[in-house]
Amino acid sequence: KFCHELLVKEAKYSSKVALVDVVKAVIQYIDKPNLEHPMRANVGCEYVENRSEFNRKALECVRQHALPRN
């Protein structure tokens, strides 16, 4: 799940929003997650308190669900 002001109806999303702006917003959330308001509290706690376990689970998830690159 991902929520950003560029994409919510309340912000009056417009088709004029460039794809590059959406991608930048996603990358920003990945690089600097909002730890004060995580989407899932238990995952936010693990990210802060046990980063190595969080990273292990994240890598496992990526390996399981990632699309192959050509």
Image: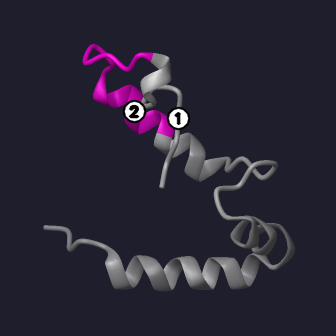
Q: Are marks 2 and 1 in contact (CB under 8 Å)?
A: yes
- Sequence-wise, the earlier of marks 2 and 1 is 1
> Is 40 above or below relative to 30?
below
Q: Residue furthest front?
A: 10
Q: Nearer the viewer, residue 38 or 27?
A: 38
Mark 1 element type: loop
| Amino acid on which the number 2 mark rests in the picture | Val
Name the spot of residue 32 as percent of width and height, x first. 67, 47
Say which mark, if any, is on residue 49.
none
Q: Classify 10 Å Cα crowding around label 2: few (below 14), some (14-19), many (20 and above).
A: some
Is 51 one of the magenta-colored residues? no
Q: Secondary structure at mark 2?
A: helix
Position of 19 with respect to 23 (left or right) is left
| Residue 50 spot, x, y in % from top left | 81, 79
Which percent across, then down, holds residue 3? 52, 42
Relative height, residue 9 to residue 61 (above, below)? above
Q: How many marks?
A: 2
Is 24 within the magenta?
Answer: yes
Residue under pointer 1:
4
- Quarter of the image with the C terminus is bottom left
Question: What's the residue at 36%, 85% (across, down)?
Answer: 64
Which residue bears the numbered disc 2?
Answer: 22
- Is residue 60 found left or right of 28 in the rendered image? left
Foreground: 40 or 33? 40
Furthest toward the left, the residue is 70
Q: Please state which amino acid type lies under the numbered disc 1.
A: His
Q: Nearer the viewer, mark 2 or mark 1?
A: 1
Q: Position of residue 67 (x, y in %)?
A: 24, 71
Magenta residues?
12-25
**To which quarter of the image does residue 19 belong?**
top left
Cα separation, mark 2 vs mark 1, equals 9 Å
